[in-house]
Image: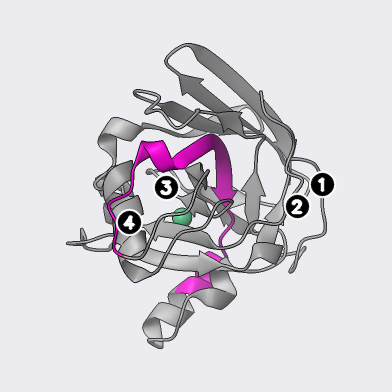
Amino acid sequence: MGAEVQHVPGAIYCVGRNFVAHVRELGNTVPGQPVIFLKAPTSVRGLQPAPMAFPTETYSHELELVLRLGRGVPLGAAAGWTDVDAVTLGIDVTRREVQNQCKEARLPWTPSKSFAGSAVLGPFVPTHARAPGPIAFSLTVGGELRQQADTARMIFDVPTVLTHIASLGPLRPGDLVFTGTPQGVGPLSVGESFELVLQLPDETIRMPGVL
Ligand code: MG
């Protein structure tokens, strides 16, 4: 297992609407290309309690597979698992009401997605620039299973997502990509316990945490 989060990454790209059942649960339409947004690097925190902006709000949890770039990808180049050096699970902590207000006002989502503590990250697991095969992942909150998915159900797979992001600009080593949440998003408050479970073909890694 990799080390706990120790560095501030460069860019944190996030994919929206990458699982059909989640697109439907929020009343959105299935996109024709990946929906990309950003979190500030200062959004990152680990699995143990850490300062959160808006600590008294009830957030919405979005379980996601997170990729770490192991090497740079030039602008416009095809990218894929060979450019990824590690994976982990994360929670895209979301202020859903604020996001809905932003959508209604046709304003950027940033205040709902990028704030201190909004990018929860487990320890990174090396993938050694190889495709790891199917990955299953789940989130329990207070012992209750909330979200469960696998990479085969992504609308846009990892190479498609990375290549799309590289069409916007070069990727750099250490950049992170949140690859989208499956259905089952729900409430999560400061102090609540959760467990992320990452199932690689040859290894299951449990990552307990507290928001
Ligand atoms: Mg998300």
* Left or right placement of residue 81 versus residue 9 in this view: left
- Residue visible at 41% across and 26% down in the picture: 136
* Left or right placement of residue 27 versus residue 186 in this view: left
Q: Which residue is mark 2?
A: 190
Find the residue positioned furthest to the left: 32
Query: Which residues lie in the magenta part?
Result: 76-99
> Does the magenta segment cover residue 87?
yes
Q: Which residue is mark 1?
A: 49
* Left or right placement of residue 138 versus residue 151 in this view: right
User: Is label 2 in contact with label 1 (beta carbons under 8 Å)?
Assistant: yes
Q: Which residue is mark 4?
A: 17
151 or 159: which is nearer to us?
A: 159
Label 1, secondary structure: give it.
Answer: loop
The span from disc 1 to disc 3 (Cα, nearest Å) is: 22 Å
Cβ of disc 1 within 8 Å of ligand 1? no
User: Is label 1 in contact with label 4 (beta carbons under 8 Å)?
Assistant: no
Classify 10 Å Cα crowding around label 3: few (below 14), some (14-19), many (20 and above).
many
Find the residue positioned furthest to the top: 202
Classify 10 Å Cα crowding around label 4: few (below 14), some (14-19), many (20 and above).
many
First-in-chain label (1 vs 3): 1
First-in-chain label (4 vs 2): 4
153 or 128: which is nearer to us?
A: 128
User: Of the numbered discs in the image, which one, if any, rests on residue 181?
Assistant: 3
First-in-chain label (2 vs 1): 1
The span from disc 3 to disc 2 (Cα, nearest Å) is: 20 Å
Label 2, secondary structure: give it.
Answer: loop
First-in-chain label (3 vs 2): 3
Q: Position of residue 87 (x, y in %)?
A: 52, 36
